[in-house]
Amino acid sequence: MADIAHATRIEPLAGRAAGGAGVSVTPAGPANRVSLRAGSADTNALSKALGLKLPMSPKTSESNGKGRLAAWLGPDEWLIIDETGDPLADLGKVDVLHSVVDISHRNTAILVSGQGARATLEAGCPQNLSDRVFPVGSATRTVMGKIEVVILRTGEDDFRVECWRSFSDYAFGMLSEAARDCLA
């Protein structure tokens, strides 16, 4: 196997924070991310390698409780986020047909928390994020303002917004302004 060069990741939003009454907007810590594509017949072997069951239903996610999360993005597509391990290495050991691409340097995340978190996100997102439609554990690829994002509901009042790092200033600014207005 060829040696793989790894660039040092510089978090684009490091040190920034914003919020309003009842909501905070902060950059997430570093994480490894991969885009995984595979057929449903191969998901058991891939799930075993990842240490969590790949979600098979739209708008769902699964977590192993140890910093690794898989979000369903399409019938054969998942976003894997890992704060402590290397999902690329784990999936590289699996002998089933799949495609896995490291997108760690492309993406970053913003955490939106507090009782005004949902209202903050809904200020720029057309997706219905209500408790009934988007309960804890939900995940969706959608738009926020003019950019594509993946929104994960990680807690009752906690959301993770994954976006391309080149759009992170825009996303952070939009969420910061919405947070200030949210409960004013």
Image: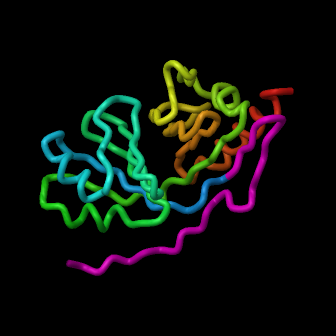
At 63% across and 46% down in the image, what residue appears? 111
Count of residue discs? 0
Viewer-proximal residue, 49 or 125? 49
Magenta stretch in the rendered image: 1-26
Most extreme residue toward the right is: 184
At 81% across and 29% down in the image, what residue appears? 181
At 17% across and 42% down in the image, what residue appears? 39
Q: Residue 161 lies in what quarter of the image?
A: top right
Q: Position of residue 93 (x, y in %)?
A: 20, 66
Most extreme residue toward the front is: 65
Looking at the image, what colour scheme do you see? rainbow
Q: Is residue 12 magenta?
A: yes
Q: Position of residue 113 (x, y in %)?
A: 68, 40
Viewer-proximal residue, 140 or 149? 140
Q: Is residue 155 left or right of residue 79?
A: right
At 82% across and 27% down in the image, what residue appears? 183
Screen quadrant of the N terminus:
bottom left
Q: Position of residue 94 (x, y in %)?
A: 18, 61
Q: Is residue 47 left or right of residue 151?
A: left
What main secondary structure does the magenta stretch of the protein show?
loop
Q: Position of residue 63 (x, y in %)?
A: 42, 48
Q: Is residue 101 magenta?
A: no
Q: Is residue 111 left or right of residue 164?
A: right
Screen quadrant of the C terminus:
top right
Residue 68, above or below 122: below
Residue 64, above or below 90: above
